Image (cartoon, coloured by chain):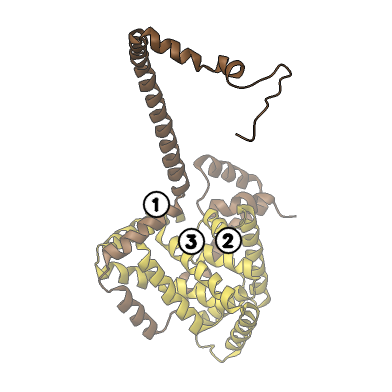
């Protein structure tokens, strides 16, 4: 039966991916678990003997070496590479969506504030208009008031609408 | 010196050459290329099983690194980043060619024939071939994790990201890979501990 700690923590320990506290805990575990101790010893030994670049690595052909070195040693077109690279980084780091949301939010708030300002200005101008209307009304001659009263909607039905007592409006089509 | 300190030193050295490379100094690139070409090529060769394909992918990997050098996150290891690109190229290759099974089979057969070849003058070379054969006999996922970790020094967290799987899956594959390699080596009379 294998100790689960080797898979869960031992491999991370050998890769140096544990925090200092976790590493210390695992080292404490090693003092009591023979299985983990053996695994660690075997793995380190294999790493030294077999899992090296000399054993696992392969050399590419000289022709490919020369080709890669030639292509990648050309002067770097900095501006042409830098602009798409920056844009790619912009996309890669997922800045685009928050940035767009911010812009949309900014425009919306601006629009609302602009409308509020307009409403405030209209409200501020409203009393002046009333004052003008009041002055005009005061200046109107009485004769004009009387003539307008004759055309008011209240009197229209009884005087010019030909409304009979049954509530039906008769219309003379010959006219 | 424990491996972590060694890795840190290596990483710092890589950063220096990488900075030179970005400034347009050829030496920066050539040092990094010569330092890591065998590891990357070893990975590509073992993953594809064909030398020509691996060489093409090696070229593509370094060209992609050259083109995207400005995107490299300096807090990461250069080698891990390079292996991330190489891994992506391999996946793209298999996706387009759809020849994984055939190539794997060819690779295993070709390695098998190499081991039987009369090359016993160099014991180290034989051990090398046996180890490589054991690695190539692994399940593709186990081989992938194993090579990324051992050749590329890629942290398990990044391996999980690269392979799009939980970290525990990556650790499980690594454990199985180690166990299978050990069994294979023992079968051929090589003991890892001795």
Q: Quadrant of residue A32?
A: top right
Q: Which of disc 3 and disc 2 is earlier in sequence?
A: 3
Could you say which is closer to the camera, residue B186 or residue B60?
Answer: B60
Q: Which of disc 1 and disc 2 is earlier in sequence?
A: 1
Residue B163 is marked as 2
Name the residue beneath numbered marker 3.
B153
Q: Chain of mark 1?
A: B
Q: Chain A hue?
A: brown
Q: Is residue A110 visible?
A: yes
Q: Dot 1: within a 10 Å radius of its alpha carbon, few (fewer than 14), some, or many (20 or more) residues?
A: few
Are circles 1 and 3 on residues that touch, CB within 8 Å? no
Could you say which is closer to the camera, residue A45 or residue A118?
Answer: A118
Separation (CA) of disc 2 from disc 1: 21 Å
Residue at screen point 43% across, 30% down: A112
Could you say which is closer to the camera, residue A16 or residue A158?
Answer: A158
Separation (CA) of disc 1 from disc 3: 15 Å
Quadrant of the snapshot with the C terminus of chain A: top right
Q: B25 left or right of A149?
A: left
Name the residue beneath numbered marker 1.
B75
Separation (CA) of disc 2 from disc 3: 15 Å
Residue at screen point 61% across, 58% down: B170
Q: Nearer the viewer, mark 1 or mark 3?
A: 1
Image coordinates of residue B140 in percent, x first then y, are 63, 70
Could you say which is closer to the camera, residue A14 or residue B136?
Answer: B136
Q: A73 left or right of B88?
A: left
Q: Secondary structure at mark 3?
A: loop
Q: Is residue B194 visible?
A: no
Image coordinates of residue B189 in percent, x first then y, are 64, 77
């Amino acid at each position: 039966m294998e100790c689960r700690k080797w898979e869960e923590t031992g491999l991370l320990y050998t890769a140096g991916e544990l925090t200092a506290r976790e590493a210390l805990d695992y080292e404490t575990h090693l003092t009591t678990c023979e299985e983990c101790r053996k695994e660690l010893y075997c793995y380190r030994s294999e790493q030294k003997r077999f899992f090296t670049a000399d054993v696992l690595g392969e050399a590419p052909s000289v022709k490919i070496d020369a080709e890669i070195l030639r292509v990648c040693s050309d002067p770097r077109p900095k501006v042409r590479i830098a602009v798409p690279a920056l844009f790619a980084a912009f996309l890669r780091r997922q800045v685009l969506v928050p940035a767009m949301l911010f812009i949309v939010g900014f425009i919306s708030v601006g629009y609302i504030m602009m409308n509020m300002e307009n409403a405030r200005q209209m409200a501020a101008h409203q009393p002046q208009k009333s004052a003008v209307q009041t002055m005009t009304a005061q200046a109107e001659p009485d004769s004009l008031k009387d003539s307008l009263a004759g055309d008011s909607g209240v009197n229209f039905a009884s005087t010019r609408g030909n409304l009979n007592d049954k509530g039906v409006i008769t219309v003379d089509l010959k006219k | 010196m424990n491996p972590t300190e060694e890795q840190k030193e290596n990483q710092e050295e890589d950063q220096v050459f990488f900075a030179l490379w970005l400034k347009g100094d050829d030496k920066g690139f050539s040092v990094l290329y010569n330092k890591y070409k065998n590891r990357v090529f070893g990975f590509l060769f073992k993953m594809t099983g064909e030398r020509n394909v691996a060489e093409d992918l090696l070229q593509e990997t370094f060209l992609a690194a050259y083109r995207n050098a400005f995107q490299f996150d300096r807090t990461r290891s250069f080698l891990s980043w390079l292996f991330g690109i190489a891994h992506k190229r391999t996946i793209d290759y298999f996706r387009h060619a759809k020849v994984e099974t055939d190539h794997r089979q060819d690779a295993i057969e070709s390695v098998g024939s190499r081991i039987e070849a009369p090359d016993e003058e160099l014991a180290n070379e034989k051990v090398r071939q046996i180890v490589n054969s054991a690695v190539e006999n692994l399940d593709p996922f186990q081989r992938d994790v194993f090579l990324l970790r051992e050749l590329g020094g890629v942290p398990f967290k990044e391996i999980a990201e690269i392979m799009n799987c939980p970290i525990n899956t990556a650790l499980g594959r690594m454990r199985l890979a180690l166990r299978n390699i050990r069994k294979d080596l023992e079968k051929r009379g090589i003991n890892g501990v001795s």
